[in-house]
Image: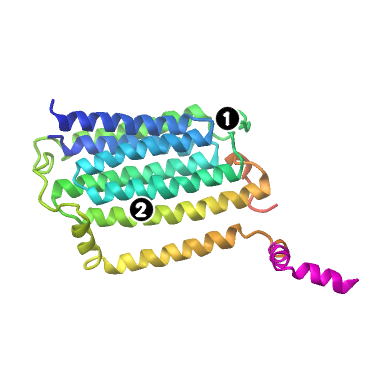
Amino acid sequence: MNLDTIIFLVSAVVAVFGGTMMIAQRNPVLSVLYLILSLVAQAVLYVQLGALFLGAVLIIVYSGAILVLFLFVIMLLNLRGSEDFGHGSKPISGVTKFVLALLFVFELIAIVRTSLLQADSPIGMMTAVPVDFGSVKAVATLLFTKYLYPFELAGVLLLAAIVGAVVMTKGPEDEGAGATDELYGIADKEAEGEK
Amino acid sequence: MITLSAYVVVAMVLFGIGVIGVLVSRNVIILFMSVELMLNAANLTLIAFSRALNVLDGHVFVFLVLTIAAAEAAVGLAMVITLFRNRETVNIDRYNILKW
């Protein structure tokens, strides 16, 4: 058992542990923290697979931005895990769902085990990491040449998402207008005019 | 050296945890995080195959998936805020009618 295997085993166990604890928590804040733990372990796996750039991106963008957004919303809505969710939804019970999902996992693993991914198949064993594999330069070269068009489309999609999120959370029209007027002192002037 | 299938099995287990989370969780925010976990499991598979086949294209796909995940999180959380404003709850079972 060399160092590589130990690192793999530890990060795999931590990733799975973090994911399991995430769905088991009542308090959403703890849930987010466990997901961050799982993501950091996954970033270690990325780095082990030679994806240095994406490992950094996973920590910076995912743990740093997306999950902070989750935390922000949880604290904005003031959720503390004290909300009563009742017992069992009507159509299918929670236990049935759990068993079905577990069967799904075993099915997936069985497929992987019996398919081409055996250790003796050509792609099963990984060769040594090529120089420059997964570096910023290598990924960026591919991103700005072969995949330039999808990259630009992703930018447009992000813009659409930003506009959509702002429009959706803006609230009722009159409320927004009132707040703006107050901000600029227009409401006060109008009130004086009425007098 | 660790085999490709080891990484794929880890990704499968993570994906399965995400599926369990989506099916079982009643808190809409935890449900969203389960979806994020499933996206990440798919990313891990892409990176593992990218490494095994020695092509970098998978890394670009993962980059694009991360972009989509960010957009999805932003829009999804905006929807959660709007729903919470109307219903005062994050219990997914209470979001059972489209109009009220």
SS category of the residue bearing label 2: helix
- As drawn, the residue found furthest toward the top would be A1
Name the residue beneath numbered marker 1.
Answer: A88
Q: Characterize the local packing of mark 1: few (<14), some (14-19) or many (20 or more) Cα atoms within 10 angstroms.
A: few
Identified at 58% across, 63% down, the residue is A167
Q: Mark 2: few, some, or many residues within 10 Å (few <14, many ≥20)?
A: many
Image height check: is A95 above or below A150?
above
Q: Is A195 situated left or right of B84 in this image? A: right
The location of residue A116, given as percent across then percent down, is 15, 40
Q: In the image as oriented, which residue stretches furthest toward the right?
A: A195
The residue beneath circle 2 is B66
Give A76 or A87, whichever is nearer the viewer: A76
- Give the secondary structure at mark 1: loop
Inspect this view and state whether residue B4 appears.
yes
Which of the pair A93/A30 is nearer the observer?
A: A30
Residue B14, given in percent of the width and then of the height, sits at: 34, 36
Residue A145 sits in which quadrant? bottom left
Question: Which secondary structure class fits the magenta region best?
Answer: helix
Magenta span covers which residues? A176-195
The quarter of the rendered structure image containing the N terminus of chain A is top left
Picture residue at 49% right of the left edge, 41% below the top: B31
Amino acid type, label 1:
Gly
Is residue B25 visible in this depiction of the protein?
A: no
- In the rendered image, residue A66, in percent from the top left (x then y), is placed at 44, 49
Q: Quadrant of residue B44?
A: top left
What colour-coding does the image apply? rainbow
- Check residue A180 for magenta coloring: yes
Q: Residue furthest bottom?
A: A193
Q: Nearer the viewer, residue A128 or A124?
A: A128
Mark-to-mark CA distance, 1 and 2: 34 Å
